[in-house]
Amino acid sequence: MSGLAQRIERHWYQPVWWMTALLAPLEGLFALLSALRRGLYRAGLLRAQKLPVPVVVIGNINVGGVGKTPLTLSLLRQFQAAGVPVGVISRGYGGNHAAPVLLSRGSLPKEVGDEPLLLAASGAPVAVGRDRVAAGRLLLARHPELRLILTDDGLQHYRLARDLEIAVLDGRRGVGNGRLLPGGPLREPVSRLRSVQAVVVNGGGAPAFASEPGMPPVFGMSLTPGRLHPLDLGTPSRPASAFSTLRVTAMAGIGHPERFFDTLKALGIAPQRELAFPDHHDFSAADLPEDADAILVTAKDAVKLSAVIHDATQRARLWVLPVTARLEPDLADWILTQLKIQHGR
């Protein structure tokens, strides 16, 4: 990330008046274009396309990582346990696909993106495509048994009609200075949250506006870390304490890498070095530090690293920290109740 980009992002959460004034014209243009697009769909001049099964959008109004992927994974597992056939459609950020594609065992991160591969590991069918409507149709053509579709991101992809919208917020960072891009971190104004059906707050407390009249129900989410496991699963997993005497580097290419670093510290792991890369970073062997006994990464980054790191010695140094999302109250059951979908068993 360039120095200017870092300064702008810092302004989002620690605002200074002169930068607010400097970015105001661009923010105004972004707000105008965004509102125009939303208005065209609301007026029916642009038509949303509906799929034949219910669609639940899991998205956010701000840029940066908020925890959508672990939330989606948690919901997938709960729906599967309830006997509800469920699939996923995703934009596939970081992939180079031109047409919609259904993920298979041979799919690579550079083709379909990292998050879809992580979601596909749940066993649910996943289709990716810039055109989410076409991706949804492909998914249903190959899997007509599906009774529900989740979209990973896509809150602003209005061409795809949706039955429920769930907005995810980072409980620590919230909405920052509350301004739209590039003056702030928001893709849509805070008022957009009034039109979704549920808000999920990842960590921290719910923001003050969550209790205002007209706001949808709020669900609290916490991420519970598990035992670290090697990139190659042939080696047993280890507790965090096993890394206390090693030279450890923490490495993350996600939307909010500080959350990962803080989680490691909370587990008692004190990395000698923290390497933060941009979200969806295209990893290579050159990114791995030579002086580390162990390199700790997120499950999302592990998907990409597994595809590009082929040397056995290098792979043996890579350890993955899985996290499990826990929701309070039960979001999966709430979704099924809202959509009137019966458990399969």
Image: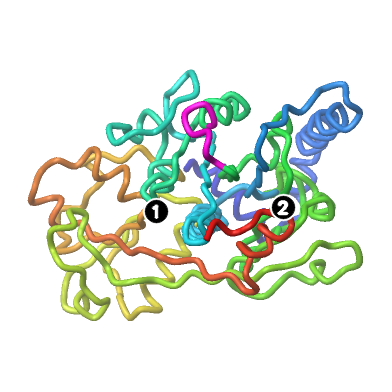
Residue at left offset 25%, top offset 39%? 307
Frontmost residue, 106 versus 137: 137
Residue 24 in the image, given as x and y percentages of width and height: 80, 41
Q: Amino acid at mark 1?
A: Ala
Q: Which of label 1 and label 2 is nearer to you?
A: 2
Residue 37 in the image, given as x and y percentages of width and height: 81, 29
Check residue 260 in the rendering and tell me which mark sits there, or answer none: none
Quadrant position of residue 296? bottom left
Say which element carries label 2.
helix
Quadrant position of residue 193? bottom right
Check residue 276 in the rendering and tell me which mark sits there, or answer none: 1
The answer to whether 292 appears left or right of 5 in the picture is: left
Which residue was labeled with disc 2?
A: 339
Tell me if residue 143 is in the magenta stretch. yes
Residue 212 in the image, given as x and y percentages of width and height: 88, 68
Q: Amino acid at mark 2?
A: Leu
Real-space CA distance between mark 1 and mark 2, rounded to the nearest whole angstrom: 40 Å
Frontmost residue, 189 versus 137: 137
- Residue range of the region highlighted in magenta in the rendering: 140-146
Q: Earlier in the sequence, mark 1 or mark 2?
A: 1
Compared to residue 292, the image places residue 303 above or below, namely above
Crowding at mark 1 (Cα within 10 Å: few <14, some 14-19, many 20+)? some
The answer to whether 192 appears left or right of 245 in the picture is: right
Residue 209 in the image, given as x and y percentages of width and height: 82, 67
Q: Residue furthest front?
A: 345
Residue at left offset 47%, top offset 18%? 98
